[in-house]
Image: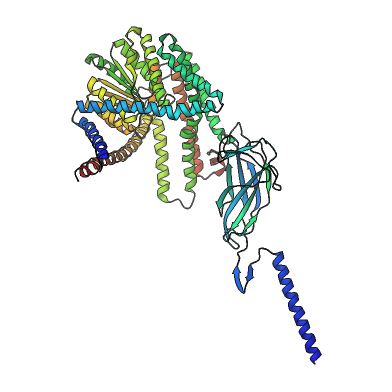
């Protein structure tokens, strides 16, 4: 390991340990690292946004003669009117424009991907059961999925209190959700542990062993 | 006798010459013959595969233009016959297919090839794709940007042909099909269900909102997490500690973030009334701007505009884990009594909730990210699961628009549930005529 790499790796390792010190309690080392990473990332993102957004989407478009890109650029500039209290109300116009377009785009997209395609997919899975290649357990799985969907949907009815039959069905629904959450939790925790292992490997293999070998 | 032999020899010679001549003629007429004799060595030359047939090209429907859909019947030698098709090469030319012509001045059709401007030359065949044998369909999707390398102009006639390439390299050409023009469509016929669903939902929503505005009492069942909001704010007031409100990492156009703004409005109004401190660290600058407006309006509504401080809503950074580090620091240093995590969350959810739990804060969370909900369920006191987050904003706001929307959602869910049950029954009974309706043709 050359000198420059050794310095860089040591800095990274010390900062890692500073962050880990939070496991004990809040302390000056953690505070220092926290402020460092916040400051560096904020500066980094400013440069990233300038290079990846402002330059290609405004500057280069205008140079190419696409003058209509001045309109979104102007709307963006209007956001800065917030700096002056008297003119701060003007910034609501670009916000309204942005939210209006975003909502208009989102509604049909959500309706298609998160509602209709899910329901149609469920129905088509029953159609597929008639296929001779589908085995018994696939059939059981499809039935369980449908029961889970119906009971979970009932749980999310807000117009009726969860009492009586509705309450019973909703209870099955929340159990279905919790079983799903449990599986997801276990899966993600395993992924997080692999992140910890990677950090420990960095501290031992890339830092300690290489530095002192 | 000698004369007879002589005649036989002459006849035999003439016959051999005729046969050789006919053979040579046959060689000339059939360039793709099976054999070629060179210096007594026989080289097997593989014949070209049979050409494809019935080439059809149409403008790709339901798109923004610049695309064609090609179909054909595969070669008789593909998966059958001599089985010697290696691939199909698809060629395209603008205009009518014809002989190679020189560029005729500036044409309306342009393309960019390796940074240079060219105009499409009629009669020049471009290879647009080579696809494996056995394929009988191809989507020729071009770009719509004139400056792009893959630009394919609309309203320009293109002709197509397909070469069947044999394993030995010999090719056979299909008949030319064209010209065909591409164009964009305003309406996607495959998304009719989406249009109907949006219209039905919109109609339900307008009806419910009108009913709510007319004073109709719309019942919404109590949500545990929402009932705890007032309690949590009261606790913070009693303890004299601040309240932390995290809007998550979502952009302002995400539905969970929009719902969170409504809840923030309610929380900020209560905070203003109780004169408690509110801290709202933001990940996104636009979210910060909207949050500032929301909190300010809440303070105005509470009649405490003088207590509003713009610094209570501030931007941290747009780096996920740097943001988490900063929020964790706030929790521990400011000893927040109550933490709200409502909006869009990713891997930071458990880190935030765990730190808040260690700090002894009462925590109310809510997100529509299924993968993050388990962490909130485990580490927070109350969790709004998915749609409960949207319902919470209506429940708290009690505004006719929100209440009407929530009611409309319930009715829409009921309709969808009924539709799904019908579809499932049709699926079980294998009623193809009915199950065919349960599909989007996208």
Q: Quadrant of residue B271?
A: top left
Q: Quadrant of the N terminus of chain A?
A: top left
Q: Quadrant of residue A39?
A: top left
Q: Residue B386: where, in percent of width, then height?
A: 38, 29
Q: Is residue B244 visible?
A: yes
Residue found farthest to the front: A3
- Residue B98 appears left or right of A100: right
Residue found farthest to the bottom: B1
Q: Is residue B361 visible?
A: no
- Residue B142 appears left or right of B384: right
Instruction: Relative to B12, say whether B74 is above or below.
Output: above
The figure's colour scheme reads: rainbow
Q: Nearer the viewer, residue A163 or B26?
A: B26
Instruction: Relative to B151, say whether A159 is above or below.
Output: above
Q: Nearer the viewer, residue B83 or B201?
A: B83
Q: Residue B405: where, in percent of width, then height?
A: 46, 22
Q: Quadrant of residue A26?
A: top left
Q: Residue A77: where, in percent of width, then height?
A: 46, 18
Instruction: Relative to B3, say whether B242 is above or below.
Output: above
- Residue B319 appears left or right of B31: left
Residue found farthest to the right: B3
Q: Residue at x 74, y 76 (%)?
A: B17
Total numbered circles: 0
Q: Nearer the viewer, residue B381 or A161?
A: B381
Q: Residue B115: where, in percent of width, then height?
A: 55, 38
- Residue B394 appears left or right of B274: right
């Amino acid at each position: 390991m050359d000198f420059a790499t050794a310095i860089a790796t040591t800095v990274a390792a010390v900062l890692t340990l500073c962050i880990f010190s939070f496991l004990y309690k809040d302390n000056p080392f953690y505070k220092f690292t926290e402020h460092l990473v916040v400051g560096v990332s904020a500066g980094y993102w400013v440069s990233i946004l300038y290079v990846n957004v402002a330059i290609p989407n405004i500057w280069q478009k205008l140079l190419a003669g696409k003058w209509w890109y001045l309109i979104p650029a102007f709307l963006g500039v209007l956001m800065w009117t917030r700096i002056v209290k008297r003119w701060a109300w003007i910034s609501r116009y670009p916000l309204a424009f942005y939210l209006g377009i975003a909502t208009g785009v989102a509604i049909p997209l959500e309706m298609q991907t998160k509602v209709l395609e899910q329901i149609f997919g469920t129905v088509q899975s029953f159609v597929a059961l008639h296929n001779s290649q589908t085995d018994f357990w696939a059939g059981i799985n499809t039935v369980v999925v449908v029961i889970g969907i119906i009971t979970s949907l009932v749980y999310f009815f807000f117009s009726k209190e969860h009492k009586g039959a509705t309450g019973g069905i909703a209870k099955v629904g929340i159990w279905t959700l919790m079983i799903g959450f449990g599986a997801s939790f276990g899966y993600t925790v395993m992924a997080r542990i692999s992140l910890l292992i990677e950090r420990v490997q960095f501290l031992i293999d890339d830092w300690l062993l290489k530095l002192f070998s | 006798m000698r004369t007879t032999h002589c005649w036989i020899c002459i006849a035999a010679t003439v016959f051999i010459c005729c046969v050789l001549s006919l053979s040579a003629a046959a060689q000339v007429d059939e360039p793709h013959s099976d054999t070629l004799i060179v210096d007594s060595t026989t080289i097997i030359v593989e014949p070209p595969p049979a050409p494809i047939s019935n080439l059809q090209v149409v403008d790709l429907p339901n798109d923004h233009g610049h695309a064609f859909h090609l179909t054909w019947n595969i070669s008789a030698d593909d998966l059958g016959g001599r089985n010697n098709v290696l691939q199909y090469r698809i060629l395209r030319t603008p205009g009518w297919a014809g002989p190679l012509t020189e560029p005729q001045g500036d044409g309306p059709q342009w393309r960019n090839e390796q940074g240079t401007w060219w105009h499409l030359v009629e009669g020049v065949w471009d290879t647009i794709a080579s696809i494996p044998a056995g394929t009988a369909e191809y989507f020729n999707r071009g770009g719509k940007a004139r400056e792009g390398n893959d630009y394919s102009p609309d309203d320009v006639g293109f002709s197509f042909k397909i070469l069947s390439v044999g394993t030995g390299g010999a090719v056979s050409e299909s008949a030319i099909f064209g010209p065909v023009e591409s164009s964009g469509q305003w309406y996607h016929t495959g998304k009719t269900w989406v249009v109907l669903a949006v219209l039905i939902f919109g109609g339900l929503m307008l009806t419910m909102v009108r009913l709510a505005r007319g004073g109709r009492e719309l019942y919404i069942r109590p949500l545990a997490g929402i009932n705890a909001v007032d309690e949590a704010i009261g606790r913070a007031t009693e303890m004299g500690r601040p309240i932390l409100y995290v809007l998550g990492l979502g952009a302002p156009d995400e539905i969970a973030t929009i719902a969170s703004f409504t809840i923030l409005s309610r929380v900020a109004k209560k905070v203003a009334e109780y004169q408690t401190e509110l801290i709202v660290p933001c990940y996104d600058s636009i979210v910060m701007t909207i949050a500032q407006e929301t909190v300010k309006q809440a303070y105005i509504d509470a009649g405490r505009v003088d207590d509003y401080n713009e610094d209570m809503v501030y931007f941290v950074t747009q780096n996920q884990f740097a943001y988490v580090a900063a929020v964790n620091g706030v929790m521990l240093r400011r000893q927040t009594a109550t933490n709200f995590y409502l909006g869009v969350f990713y891997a930071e959810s458990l880190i935030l909730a765990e730190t808040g739990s260690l700090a002894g804060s009462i925590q109310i969370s809510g997100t529509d990210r299924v993968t993050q909900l388990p962490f909130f369920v485990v580490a927070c006191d109350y969790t709004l699961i998915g749609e409960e987050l949207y319902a919470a904003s209506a429940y708290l706001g009690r505004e006719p628009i929100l209440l009407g929307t929530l009611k409309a959602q319930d009715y829409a869910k009921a309709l969808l549930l009924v539709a799904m049950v019908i579809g499932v029954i049709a699926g079980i009974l294998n009623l193809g005529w009915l199950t065919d309706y349960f599909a989007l043709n996208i």
